[in-house]
Image (cartoon, rainbow, N blue to C red):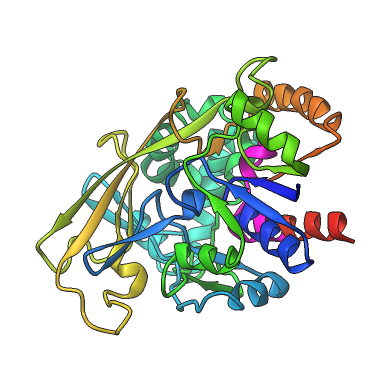
């Protein structure tokens, strides 16, 4: 018998498994993919550490979480400062004085604020009812049209007027010349990659890859061997989508190695017009400042074009679509989950909730503390 069988080796599963094993519990981790780490999996391609499932920049204001990850991996000082390409013209992200100067030619915070206020009043928006209205209220119509609308509609596959205002509430807008997107107290990327972080968390713990827990035969065998199950897969899939399918957005990547030293001069460039179909290009070497682990300059480069799409069976689910329809359906699934005495649901997929990495870790530690008390 295992005290815990953990389904999924992403951050939630790995952190919980580590805490349970450290408390003397017998733990088994099951992973459907051929590798551990979930969507934060990284792998070397030549000298370049590649984020296989898209860019992941760790950032937090939670010192407890920051101190926790530092125990398992050394982090570099990478600061997320993406830029936007709109019809060949470059703009700074997050929206700040560099952006406003490029868009309107303004040079002072007072001029930028006045321009935004003017466009907000012209739009006549008092209580934003959707993402479009919320965006115009925050940054004005010009920036919305150039830097938000096309990108967002590609990202979510829906018109901005059909998306909830809450999606863009996290959007940083600054009347300063500050390109730090997250502006978090602690920020960086593991020097040896996220896979190394997960390996350290799972050190000494039994892990089985290429195992689909939801296969009926596998599930029967595993349930019989576990006192408790910690499930981090899709919530609706656990129940066979018996109430209907929850919606997700997925991503497709076109990754290629180029025999040049520098493709775009930045780790992340967003393409904010409706064309091209990809939302951004990631140049992975700049997550490590263009150097390998020994500090040598990397002479080639690897880029990934990121294409969002509607999730279909067999795809990797990335982002829950937290609109009214899906949230209502999710609440019905959670009622079923509450009746599962033996199973704990966690993580972005298991809770159908958008979590940043630090929040996933904090939640996993919280659940571990409750169950291991």
Q: Nearer the viewer, residue 9 or 216?
A: 216
- When the figure is inspected, residue 106 is found, relative to residue 27, above or below; the finding is below
Q: Is residue 17 visible?
A: yes
Which residues lie in the magenta part? 347-362
Residue 60 occupies quadrant: bottom right
How many numbered tags mark residues here? 0
- Residue at 79%, 30% (x, y): give it: 337
Q: Nearer the viewer, residue 254 or 151?
A: 254
- Residue at 71%, 21% (x, y): give it: 329
**Which residue is the extreme one toward the front?**
1
Whole-percent x and y of residue 158?
47, 25
Q: Nearer the viewer, residue 172 or 76?
A: 76
Whole-percent x and y of residue 76?
45, 78
- When the figure is inspected, residue 223 is found, relative to residue 227, above or below; the finding is above
Whole-percent x and y of residue 55?
41, 55
Residue 80 occupies quadrant: bottom left
Quarter of the image with the C terminus is bottom right
- Residue at 54%, 58% (x, y): give it: 173
In magenta stretch: residue 348: yes
Side (left or right) of 36 relative to 186 = left
**Which residue is the extreme one toward the left?**
259
Q: Nearer the viewer, residue 104 or 243?
A: 243
- Residue at 11%, 65% (x, y): give it: 260
In magenta stretch: residue 211: no
């Amino acid at each position: 018998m295992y005290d815990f069988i953990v389904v999924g080796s992403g951050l939630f599963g790995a952190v919980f498994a580590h805490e349970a094993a450290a408390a003397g519990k017998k733990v088994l981790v099951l992973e459907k993919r051929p590798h551990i780490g979930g969507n934060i999996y990284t792998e070397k391609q030549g000298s370049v550490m590649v984020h296989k499932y898209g860019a992941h920049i760790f950032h937090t204001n939670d010192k407890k979480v920051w101190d926790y990850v530092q125990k398992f991996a050394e982090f570099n000082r990478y600061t997320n400062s993406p830029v936007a390409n709109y019809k060949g013209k470059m703009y700074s992200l997050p929206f700040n004085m560099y952006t406003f100067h490029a868009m309107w030619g303004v040079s002072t915070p007072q001029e930028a604020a006045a321009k935004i206020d003017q466009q907000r009043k012209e739009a006549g928006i008092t209580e934003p009812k959707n993402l479009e209205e919320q965006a115009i209220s925050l940054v004005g119509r010009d920036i919305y049209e150039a830097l938000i609308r096309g990108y967002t509609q590609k990202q979510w596959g829906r018109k901005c007027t059909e998306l909830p205002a809450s999606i863009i509430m996290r959007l940083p807008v600054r009347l300063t010349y500050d390109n730090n997107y997250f502006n978090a107290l602690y920020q960086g990327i593991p020097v040896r990659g996220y896979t190394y972080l997960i390996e350290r968390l799972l050190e000494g713990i039994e892990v089985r890859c290429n195992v689909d827990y939801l296969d009926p035969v596998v599930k029967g065998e595993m349930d019989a061997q576990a006192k408790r199950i910690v499930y981090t897969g899709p919530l609706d899939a656990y129940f066979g989508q018996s109430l209907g399918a929850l919606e997700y957005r997925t991503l497709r990547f076109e990754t290629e190695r180029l025999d040049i030293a520098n493709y775009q001069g930045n780790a992340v460039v967003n393409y904010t017009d409706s064309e091209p179909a990809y939302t951004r290009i990631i140049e992975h070497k700049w997550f490590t400042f263009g150097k390998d682990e020994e500090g040598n300059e990397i002479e080639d480069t690897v880029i990934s074009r990121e294409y969002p799409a509607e999730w279909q069976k067999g795809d990797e689910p990335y982002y829950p679509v937290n609109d009214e329809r899906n949230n209502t359906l999710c609440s019905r699934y959670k009622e079923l989950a509450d009746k599962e005495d033996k199973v704990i649901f966690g993580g972005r997929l298991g809770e159908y909730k958008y979590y940043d990495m630090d929040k996933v870790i904090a939640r996993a530690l919280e659940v571990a503390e409750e169950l291991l008390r």
